[in-house]
Image (cartoon, rainbow, N blue to C red):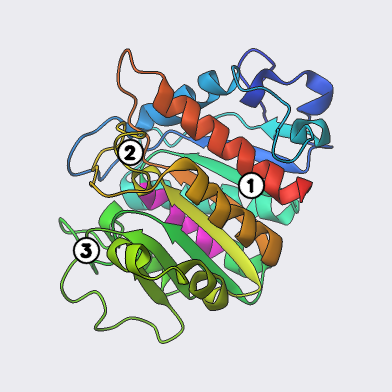
Amino acid sequence: MQYLNQNENFLGLVDELAAFETAPTVVWPLPYEATTTYATGTNAGPAAILAASQQVEFWDEELDSEPSEKGICTLAQFNCAGLNHEKALNKLADEAERLFAEDKFVLSLGGEHSVTIPLVQQAAKYWQNLSVLQLDAHSDLRESYEGSPLNHACVMARVAETCPFVSVGLRSGIQSERRNLRPDSRLIYAWQMQRDQSWMDKTLAALAENVYITFDLDFFDPSIMPAVGTPEPGGFFWYETLALLRRVFAECNVIACDIVELKPIAGLQHPEFLAAKLAYKMIGYKFGL
């Protein structure tokens, strides 16, 4: 596996902490964009997150530890130049399968949300009793969009063909999205979360033993995360998000994650720093709880 050096890798880690052979965590940049339908630029997201991560402090004050000490390898970016959308996702699936076979905790940085489709499909081959936790403003449950069932608006429809899921924070969708919902899946809307303080308990109760987390950054409120392709008002904030993630990592076996849909804004650094900090918090919750 090719991986990035200290000047380019996640957190700017020295070689002995960033080697693939010894690091339990792999950060995988996926600068892929093919089906975005509003604002474009998510292909620049992974590089922006990696650059911002070099300003993140190693010590996590909540955990009172430095999760980076266990080792984090940053792979060279996924390259699918010259391939159409379907073939690009097939190539991503092949590379993901090799990574999961190495028993690494894979944290992927998108790119558009369609990258989640092959990642979940391959994860399901290695972990039984798997469910997906989707943190997102949009349900992404269209069967097809703009002529493709692999569009970023169809991500969870494709995930549902592989395993159950729980979607949290939804603020935009389609009228028919609950009609054919899997009986073992659940949609939790933002308006419900504002009225029902037990939403977090219900989320945990609906998840399986093994969990894949897909985190679309438009889950956050646009006031703290404006750099997304399709922002929606009424989103969520830092500490309430961490409270949910901490419980999920503590009560489930989180086997992999992705963070997707960052669309960098020139001259505005805080969104990519937030995304980098979020990635580091996930790694800390995985290995520091």
Task: Give whichever of 127, 87 is nearer the camera.
Answer: 127
Instruction: Please tell me which of labels 1 and 3 falls first in the chain.
Output: 1
User: Label 1 is placed on what type of residue?
Assistant: Val
Q: CA distance from mark 1 to mark 3?
A: 29 Å
Disc number lying in front (2 or 1): 1
Residue 41: horizontal and vertical position, in percent? 29, 29
Q: Is residue 219 left or right of residue 259?
A: left
Q: Is residue 30 above or below residue 236?
A: above
Instruction: Please tell me which of labels 2 and 3 falls first in the chain.
Output: 2
Q: Is residue 41 magenta?
A: no
Q: Is residue 114 magenta?
A: yes
* Numbered mark located on residue 173 in the image: 3
Q: Which residue is rendered at x = 56% and y = 73% of the image? A: 207
Question: Mark 2 sits on what residue?
Answer: 33
Question: Mark 1 sits on what residue?
Answer: 106
Q: Is residue 205 left or right of residue 141?
A: right
